[in-house]
Image (cartoon, helix red, strand yellow):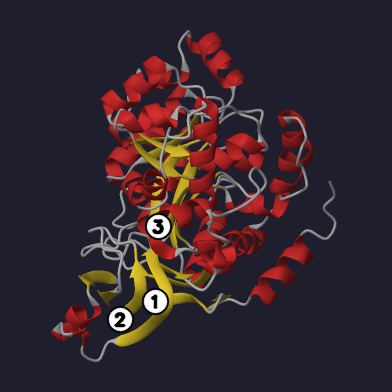
């Protein structure tokens, strides 16, 4: 399908900020530029026209780290110590969830994200119950909404966790390979499956190596939580005699394909190692603040050339699901941590939530540029949070209200129109969530 989207302003990859049209063919951007020029492109003849006048067009945002089922736990374990939250909320309710409940959670989490302008989500998924039924239900929910998803399928073998999280190494490998083959989509990248050995505490060294090995075989990156809280550094020193990133780097793994999640307590040597080996980081400032984890030295990592993408983390550790919010949180947290208002700027934080996040996930998304998938968000220029309009990127990062997000396109198709989900009604999602969580208590 040919689609022509035109807006009054834009944040495009080539730096233009004025009236812009984007032409998409089969979900791929084939032309970007001045509306008259793009309209004259022969491929624009007969295209579906989407008119975003009085709106600004920005790239769809990319959420590099989330756990969709955790949206159901929002508010249930807030403000508790970590172990109490884990036992009273996470371990109590999550093992009860069946595939249909996973679909409810995913419709809820992803539907809310779409309304906040997230067009790609990476769901780090560990409620696999020794199979792929739950993960498939989650992917299918994203498909129903029209959202782009990376299912980071967990590799988990820590015996202290509920049985629903755990697998043997052969089970995890076989299930990953099955899911990866089932959803292979090399043309449109609407669904991608990547391996995710949970963490040093959730996966044995052999399990981490198995996950990284599957990533190498499939030609995709792999994800792992590292150094989120100080106790994880202490445990790594105790068990392996080395700090987290150093211990992982000495396994049989390709660090250049690694996406470390959090890294709040990476020291100078670990940050240098991450840069040297070409690893990436999924950075979740809202969650790190919510849980009191610590402050990742983002400024240093960016200066060293590490690819960083923003993530919201789960809906019960933030508790928002907006990457635009993470852009603001990243900027403010780094500025106050360094007592330096110039520690990082809006343009850098905008990139972390769009183009470099796409690079982290190795997907052609996050830029309004030819060759990239046509994932776009419209922002209402009549909303006071974007006034005055002279400094669009600054205002999007520091001042934007979610009220201003009006329309969303994923892969050349409208999925949010006039602030409403197009394919699934919010009423259905609300009814499913309230029914499922009726007996849940704080
Ligand atoms: Zn996580």
Q: Position of residue 176 (x, y in %)?
A: 42, 46
- Would you say the beta carbon of the disc 3 residue lies within 8 angstroms of ligand 1? no
Element on which disc 3 rests:
helix
Whether residues under marks 3 and 2 lie with C-beta atoms below 8 angstroms apart, the answer is: no
Element on which disc 1 rests:
strand
Residue 24: image quadrant is bottom left
- Which residue is under mark 2? 3
Crowding at dot 2, Cα within 10 Å, few <14 / some 14-19 / many 20+, comes out as many
- Would you say the beta carbon of the disc 1 residue lies within 8 angstroms of ligand 1? no
Residue at x-position 47% and y-position 71%: 381
- Which residue is under mark 1? 413
**Residue 411 appears in the figure:** no
Q: Considering the image in quadrants, where does the N terminus appear?
A: bottom left
Q: Estimate the spatial distance between the alpha carbons at disc 3 and disc 2, rounded to whole Å.
A: 28 Å
Crowding at dot 1, Cα within 10 Å, few <14 / some 14-19 / many 20+, comes out as many
Residue at x-position 78% and y-position 58%: 437
Q: Which mark is residue 391?
A: 3
């Amino acid at each position: 399908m040919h689609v022509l989207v035109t807006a009054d302003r834009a944040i495009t990859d080539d730096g233009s900020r004025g009236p812009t049209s984007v032409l998409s063919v089969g979900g791929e951007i084939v032309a970007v530029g001045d509306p008259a020029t793009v309209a004259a492109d022969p491929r624009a003849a007969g295209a579906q026209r989407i008119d975003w006048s009085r709106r600004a067009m920005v790239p769809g945002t990319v959420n590099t780290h989330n756990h969709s089922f955790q949206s159901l736990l929002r508010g249930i374990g807030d403000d508790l110590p970590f172990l109490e939250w884990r036992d009273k909320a996470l371990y109590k309710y999550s093992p009860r969830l069946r595939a249909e409940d996973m679909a409810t959670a995913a419709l809820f989490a992803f539907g809310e994200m779409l309304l906040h302008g997230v067009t790609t989500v990476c769901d780090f998924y560990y409620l696999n119950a020794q199979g792929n039924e739950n993960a498939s239900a989650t992917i299918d929910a994203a498909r129903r909404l029209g959202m782009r998803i990376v299912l980071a399928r967990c590799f988990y073998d820590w015996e202290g966790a509920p049985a629903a999280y755990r697998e043997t190494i052969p089970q995890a490998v076989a299930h990953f390979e099955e899911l990866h083959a089932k959803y292979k989509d090399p043309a449109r990248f609407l669904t991608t499956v990547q391996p995710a050995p949970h963490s040093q505490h959730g996966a044995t060294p052999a399990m981490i190596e198995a996950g990284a090995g599957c990533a190498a075989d499939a030609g995709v990156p792999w994800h792992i939580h590292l150094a989120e809280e100080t106790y994880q550094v202490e445990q790594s020193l105790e068990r392996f005699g080395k700090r987290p990133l150093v211990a992982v780097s000495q396994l049989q793994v390709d660090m250049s394909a690694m996406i470390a999640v959090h890294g709040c307590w990476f020291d100078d040597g670990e940050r240098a190692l991450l840069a040297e080996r070409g690893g990436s980081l999924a950075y979740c400032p809202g969650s790190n603040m919510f849980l009191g984890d610590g402050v990742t030295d983002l400024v240093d990592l960016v200066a060293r050339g590490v690819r960083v993408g923003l993530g919201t983390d789960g809906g019960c550790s933030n508790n928002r699901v907006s990457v635009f919010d993470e852009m603001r949180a990243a900027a403010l947290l780094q500025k106050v941590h360094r007592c330096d208002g110039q520690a990082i700027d809006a343009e850098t934080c905008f990139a972390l939530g769009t183009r470099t996040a796409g690079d982290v996930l190795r997907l052609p998304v996050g830029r309004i540029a030819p060759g990239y998938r046509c994932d776009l968000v419209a922002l209402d220029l009549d909303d006071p949070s974007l006034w005055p309009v002279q400094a669009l990127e600054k205002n999007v990062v520091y001042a934007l209200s979610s009220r201003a997000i009006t329309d969303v396109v994923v892969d050349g198709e409208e999925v949010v129109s006039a602030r409403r989900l197009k394919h699934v009604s919010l009423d259905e999602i609300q009814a499913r969530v309230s029914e499922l969580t009726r007996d849940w208590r704080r």
